[in-house]
Image: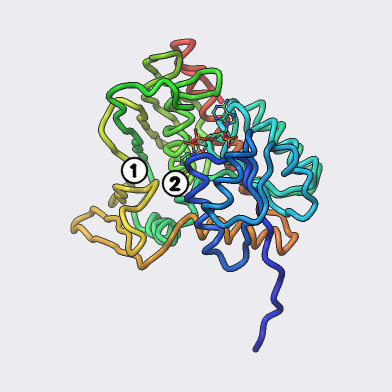
Amino acid sequence: MQTESKNPVRWGVLSTASIATKVARAINLSQNAELVAIASRTEERAAAWAQKHNVPIAYGNYDALLSDSSLDAIYIPLPPSMHAEWTIRAAEHGKHVLCEKPLSANFDEATMMADACRQNGVQLMDGVMWVHHERTAMMKEQLTNLGELRRVTAAFTFNWGTIPTNNIRAKPELAGGSLGDLGYYCVRAILWAFEEMPTRVFATARYKVGVDFSLAGILWFEDDRIATLDCGFDTGLRRWFEVAGTNASLVCDDFTVPTSEESSRFWIHGSENEKHETGACIQEVNMVERFSGIVQSDNLEPEWVDVAVNTMRVCDALRESDQRGEIVSL
Ligand SMILES: NC(=O)c1ccc[n+]([C@@H]2O[C@H](COP(=O)([O-])OP(=O)(O)OC[C@H]3O[C@@H](n4cnc5c(N)ncnc54)[C@H](OP(=O)(O)O)[C@@H]3O)[C@@H](O)[C@H]2O)c1
C-alpha cells in the first residue's frame, strides 16, 4: 500500500556555527527534510558555507533568512545569549524553531520563547540529540526493571587545558559557562529518568574568565529520590549517567554522543551484569526527522517545549543556589 507522500520540510540555518555542519549533514540524510538556506553575519561566510554544504541560498544577514517565505523550519545554533531573540523573531515569521541548547540564557527567556512559539502556532524544540537515539527508548524500557528508582548521577566534562578565550563558552556576555553547555545535558538525563521536577536543589561552582568553569549539584525529589551532577571544562572527557533503583542500576557511559554511529551500548548492573547493544543510529538524523514530522503533521508536540523550559528552570535554580550559597526550593 502506498502512503501519501508529503513535501519535505524546508530548513534554513541561522549562522555558520561549528555544530551546524553536523546538523546540515543530518538534514541532508533525513527522509523528510531539505536544507535550503544558510545565513551568516557576512555574505562571504554564508556563500562559502553554502558552497561547501551544497545549499542553494545564502543570506548575508539573519533577518533576510527569516523573511524567506519558502522556509518552514529554522535551526538556531547561535551563542546562548542570542537564542531568545532569534527564536522569538523566527516564531513571529511563522517558522518552526529547532534551537540549540541551552534553550536560553535563563528561565524567563525560555518562558518568553515558549509563549512566542505557542502564540504563533509553531513548534519549539531544543537541540538535545541523545533523547532521539533508539538507545534512549531501550534504556527507558529497562528503567522499569530496576525496582523503585532512588538515584541518578550524571557527569559531562571535558578539559580545556588552556582556556580558549574566544570560544563562546568562555564568554559571560554570550551566556557561556559549563552549566548551560554541559550540565544542561545532565539535568535533562535526571528529568528523563525521574519524570518529575526536583523539590530542592543545591550547587557550588568555580568561576574562571567570568563563567562557571565547573559546577557540582544535588537535586532532591519526592519519595526518597536524589540526583547529583557535575559538569566542567577542567576534567577529561566524561559523559555518563547511572540510574540506580532498589534492585539494579543502569549505566550509560557515553550518553550525550554514542562512541559509534554503527552501534551503541549500556549496562544493567544487578546480581549479574548485562551489556545491551543497539544497531546503527544517527541521533541527529532522528532529531531532524522527528521535528520535520511534527511540522508536516501540523500537530504540535508541547512536551518538547515543556521539557526544555523545565531544564532551564532547574539550571536557573542551580545557578541561584551557587550564588546564594544555600539550598533553593522550586
Ligand atoms: N546539540 C549539540 O550536540 C551541540 C554541540 C555543540 C554546540 N551546541 C550548541 O550550539 C550553539 C553553537 O555552538 P558552536 O560551538 O557551534 O558555536 P560557534 O562555532 O562559536 O558558532 C556560533 C555562531 O554564531 C554566530 N554568531 C553571531 N553572533 C556571534 C557572536 N557575538 N560571537 C560568536 N558567534 C556569533 C556565528 O556565525 P556567523 O558568523 O555565521 O553569523 C558563529 O559561527 C551553542 O548554543 C552550543 O551550546 C550544541
Q: Which of label 2 and label 1 is nearer to you?
A: 1
Taking the view exactly as shown, the residue that stands out farthest to the bottom is: 1
Q: Is residue 225 left or right of residue 250?
A: right
State the residue position of label 2. Answer: 193
In 3D space, how far apart are the residues under numbered discs 2 and 1 (Cα atoms)?
10 Å
Quarter of the image where the C terminus is located = top right
For the N terminus, the image quarter is bottom right
Q: Please, which residue is most extreme toward the left here?
A: 272
Dot 1 amino acid type: Phe
Left or right, 237 with reference to 179: left
The percent position of residue 12, horizontal first and vertical second, equals 66, 50
| Residue drawn at point x = 55 percent, y = 41 percent | 16
User: Relative to residue 98, is residue 182 depicted above or below?
Assistant: above
Considering only vertical position in the picture, is 70 above or below 92?
below
Do residues under tags 2 and 1 come within 8 Å of each other at their CB atoms? Answer: yes
**Residue at the image point whose x is 37% and y is 30% from the top:** 231
For residue 95, the mark is none
Q: Toward which corner of the image does residue 298 lie, by quadrant? A: bottom right
Residue matched to label 1: 241
Residue 86 falls left or right of residue 121? left
**Looking at the image, which residue is at 55% across and 18% down?**
173
